[in-house]
Amino acid sequence: MSSHNAANPQPSSPTSVVPPPTHHDILAVLLPLLAALFAALLSGTVAIPALPAVTAELGGGSVGLTWIITVALLANASSTPVWGSISDRYDTKILVQIALLTLTVGSVISACAPTLPVLLAGRVVQGVGLGGVVAVTVAVLGALIPPREQGRYSGYGAVVMAVSMAGGPLLGGALVDTPLSWRACFLLPAAPAVLALVALRRRLTPRPRRSSDTRTDWLGAVLLTAGVTLVLVWVTGSGEFDDGLLSWPQIGYPAVGAGLLVGAIAVERRAPTPVVPIDLFGQRTVACTLVASMSSGFAFYAALSFLSEFFQAARHHSATATGILLTPLVFGLALSSFASGRLITRFGKWKALLVAGALLQLAGCTMLVFTDRSAPIWWIELAVLLLGLGIGVLLQNLVSLVQNAVAPERFGAAGAAVFFFRLIGAAVGLPLLAATVPPHGEGIGRVFLLLSVLSVVGLVTVALLPNQRLRTSFDAVEEPSR
């Protein structure tokens, strides 16, 4: 069977049955999708070392530096559920190309920006493209690979994530010192994005819509996007509002944002094709998975952020040395994701592995509670490795569990919901956590005490997951436990 048919299995007729895609067929589609995912994730990490150089040339100071990161995060989080919803109703081949083009255009605008406002606009476009690439990729793979078999391929995605997270800042730091300076960092993601776009035009064929209803709840999408944006602007920028606690930004942003979100929920509950299917949250599998995903995702982003500051500010390591010291985190993530996925595919048993992953995450966070500037490096590195091993078991396998619990016509919306809540957790939690930490990274133990509490919550929700059989085909969907 050719890769042309692998990406988009056609409904079988009474007289013929289309065989499932082979490993070769899946890889023919998976590899360009991974290139697209690498480009998207790289756009969020490679520019981090360039931020001081950007504000030195374009101005903006520390506030501008913060918003270069924040606007992309806002655009990513706000657009992800919309991309997920429309990927269930429209041709994913067209959507992934649109997302890659959006990412490329945003990269070019950012790299060529003559002023800070133009750069921020480019970052918004980049963020929308990032959300689209991730959400549509999840939808395509969910429709191509049954949940039981997804574990065999989840390790590839974990490796891409690890390389982009760990290698992006190192590569960005090297590019800043070239004649192209910081602009090369923003332009770099365009290269793998274009390569992925060309490959996917050949490998990915139009997929028949799984949902017969092509209507999109645009009112709900607008209310959700506006509400999330205002709340995140308030959380991430509250320290920059100098007008006091009773000022409009401090009161109006969260109040209006909450009102818009309440309106979005009311609209979504009545919409025939909601952007975020509210009824999914009543399913025990989906609800527990979203909480566990927020716990593991937040632990990962918090570890990257606060350990980087700790290594440089409290232990006085260089940026390059810090990247090396964080290698156990991303190595453990990639290794455990790859190994656990293979074990799940082979034996069909997932519950014990996910509980073990949650325990490893808790163990790593607990060890780091007792870390300060005098702690032995072997203790810190062992804790970081355990944390990475635990998070790696959880991240991608939780997405597979959500897709296993819903009908195929909602794969895109369900998968996007996982990433949406993971992003929201990080976007809201990181600034709040940073406010509790003393300067110069000396409050690292307090950070991981809070993360340990959150890891306990994640462990409980993983333990509460119904031990459902993973489907090996898309023919039947069992009614999830509530």
Image: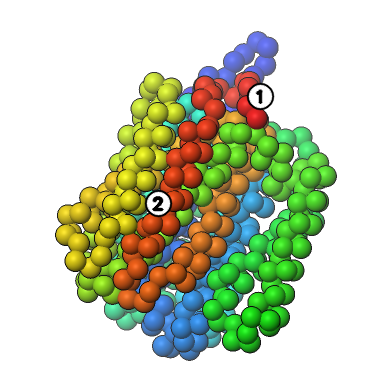
Alpha-carbon neighbours of circle 2 within 10 Å: few (<14), some, or many (≥20)?
Answer: many
At horizontal 68% and vertical 83% (from top left) the residue drawn is 247
**Residue 479 spot, x, y in % from top left:** 66, 24
Residue 277 appears left or right of 137: right
| Amino acid tagged 2 | Ser
Alpha-carbon neighbours of circle 1 within 10 Å: few (<14), some, or many (≥20)?
Answer: few
Find out whether the residues at labels 1 and 2 contact each other: C-beta distance under 8 Å. no
Residue that mark 1 sits on: 479
Q: Relative to residue 89, is residue 297 depicted above or below?
A: below
At horizontal 47% and vertical 43% (from top left) the residue drawn is 458
Between 345 and 279, the residue placed more toward the observer is: 279
Residue that mark 2 sits on: 452
**Residue 11 spot, x, y in % from top left:** 65, 23
Of labels 1 and 2, the one closer to you? 2
**Residue 116 spot, x, y in % from top left:** 53, 83
At horizontal 32% and vertical 45% (from top left) the residue drawn is 363
Q: CA distance from mark 1 to mark 2?
A: 34 Å
Could one spot residue 243 in this view of the protein? yes
Q: Relative to residue 223, is residue 419 depicted above or below?
A: above
